Image: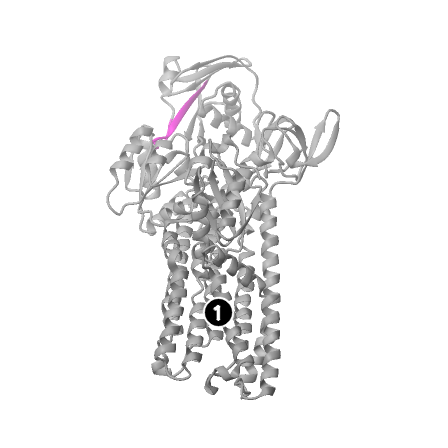
Amino acid sequence: MTTTPASEEGLQQRHLLAIDGAHCASCVGKIERALQAVPAVEQASMNLAEHTASVIGQVNNERLLDAVQNAGYRARLLDEADLSAVIEEQQEATHNARRRAWRSTVFALGLGLPVMAYGWLGGSMLITSPSQQLGWGAIGLLTLTLMLTTGRHFYSDGLRALFHGNATMDSLIAIGTFSAWFYSMLVVVFPSLFPVVSRYVYFEASAMILGLISLGQALEANAKAHSTDALKRLLSLQPDTAHKIDGDTETDVPVRGLKRHDEVRVKPGERMPVDGSIIEGTAYVDESMLTGEPMPRLKNAGDTVTAGTVNGSSSIRVRVASHSAGTTLARITRLVREAQSSKPAISRLADDIAAWFVPAVMATALISALAWLSFGPDPSITLAFVVFTSVLIIACPCALGLATPMAVIMGVGKAAEFGALIRRGDALQTAAKITHLVIDKTGTLTAGRPRITQVDATGTHSIPDVMALLASVETHSEHPIARAVVDYASQENLQPIAAKGFKAHVGQGVEAMVDEWRILAGNQQFLQHHGVDTGQASVAAVPGQTVVFVAIDETLAATVCIDDPLRHDAKQAVERIKSMGIKVAIFTGDAAPAATRIAHDVGIERVENTLLPQDKAALISAMRHPGAVIAMAGDGINDAPALASADIGFAMGSGTDIAIESADITLLSDSLTGVADTIALSRATIRTIKQNLFAAFIYNAVGIPIAAGALYPFTGSLLSPVVAGGAMALSSLSVVTNATRLRFFKAGGSAPSFSNDRAA
């Protein structure tokens, strides 16, 4: 067992346990309380759908294992650092559970169905002769064999829980089915102890209950098998091996064995095995799995690369920056898994009820049976037995325990597929209730990188010649405008020329000699100060746009318009968000002209400009009123105060360390469409959780009174334990099936995908 490194989680340690023997919401509550009672445990939560428990705190692993064992369950340590091993173990456990459930289903129904059909077809299930004693005695022994083999886990887990003072779903099943068998065997062996009308046997009830419950668990396991799909797709993006360079030789080694400062070769078409920096070679790298941008990016020596991205052109040499468990991709995968294991606040209702639910059910079954035995019509002993068994079986709280975790697993996994990393279940619930969204302009609504939008030649030089000369000068500058010029030259395949005598005049412009030409570039006042006549320049007035005047040998040669353009999908995303009933505002540090223009273009009424980071946070605090849930979407770094002040923060960008580790929700794409998609998915997930909890509560609220005999005065019959078992299995299956519908959620925009096809 390894714990989360201190560098990533401060002083916290995270422990991951695989839990055996837990099958319902009551089990979850008891295990969580047992773990939280261990000294130094800060937080403990169990995921019933995955049968794992996550514990945070400076605590010895053995104490955690002992706590689970003392609660009546079994636990094993999992190495959370090796997520692939954890997922493989969970898949293997799910596969084994499914195989066991199907085997139990076949054997149990193979015995129960013929016996039940015999009774339906008119066969006597009443003991009135020695031959019937022998025949039903043989059926009873077969039923006992079934209970001790394929149904053994129900009894072993149920009795273990009772021994530790707990009552679980398995306890209810064990008591109910054993009661049916024991009563029937008493009738077979000692028929004279019972009135003739009470000498019925219920062996088929024990077999059918075990069969139907096993069938529900088998179908449930089939649905659970899809819960790790998103994690498997993430893990598949990182290669298992890398070409490690040792001197003049290359050796294929496991990626997990690489250390910092090792060097690896990445060939064309291969995925980056680790995070690192290029030390030799140039290549176009497809980073769509992180950024959602379809165009590959040119990477040169000194540039960083990320594990899982694809080398699309030529062989490069990469120096390893972090081990496989510390890569951006590994952190993303770990965050997805942690979010899948977390609980939204809405789940507390189920947890609170589960704490007393099973004991209350057992008391209800006993009281109901005694009432029928004391006041019921003849044969009262038979009716009391039927009521006791039916109440125990129909009330199993499995559906209650699965209602929340199955929906959270599906919702968080689906969000990860389109590039939204949701850190906690609480964030999922908060996102569903957003009423106000505050957006930073630069990098969220706009591209965040200045681009040349227009070039007008005003002299004898052609546009390509002017831009090549300008790029030769701007290559020496670090200003964002210079970067826009250099990017333009690269896109147009213009070759810069060596420049001499470069000078940068802060806030004004730049100058240099390129061959025999003197190049000046800057604002209009800068060129006029150097004697350049700019009167003939004709520039379209666009609010917020930057205009660069370019002169060659003191003669105006061109005007270059530079802007931070609106993202192509920004207006559509804002319209989607507003259609959800959410009020949208722009809070930006940019000047009024640019902010107002962008707001007008996307249809946002409220604009606050020229704000400092603390100003944004203060304005968000001022927006609070009862019922308001305020979200902030920014880049996760310079918008940190505003993100922290909001009820929920969306960190936009390509998954920087700060954003991934600090934001409530991190969008791996810069597109605002991801915010709209995440809100829509959050609402769908919370709606599914509410549907599941409602179904589970209604099922028990209606089923228990019926099983106790509430309809007997109107129908003259009681609910069969067999029907109760089928209803219980159906309730669990309906909850799981409803949650799996989230797998088919469709993102409303062009968000990034973690599928291999998209990434490749």
Front-most of residues 639 and 446: 639
Whole-percent x and y of residue 162? 48, 59
Horizontally, residue 484 falls left or right of residue 261, namely left
Query: Could one spot residue 755 in this view of the protein?
Result: no
Magenta run includes residue 542: yes
342 in relation to 374, above or below: above
Q: Which residues are magenta?
A: 538-551
Q: Which residue is mark 1?
A: 176
- In which quarter of the view is residue 351 placed? bottom left
656 in relation to 377, above or below: above
Query: Could one spot residue 34 in this view of the protein?
Result: yes
Secondary element at tag 1: helix
Horizontally, residue 298 falls left or right of residue 502, namely right
At label 1, counting other C-alpha atoms closer than 10 Å, the crowd grade (few under 14, some 14-19, many 20 or more) is many
Magenta run includes residue 391: no
| Amino acid at pointer 1 | Gly
How is colour applied across the structure in the image?
A: one colour
178 in relation to 87, above or below: below
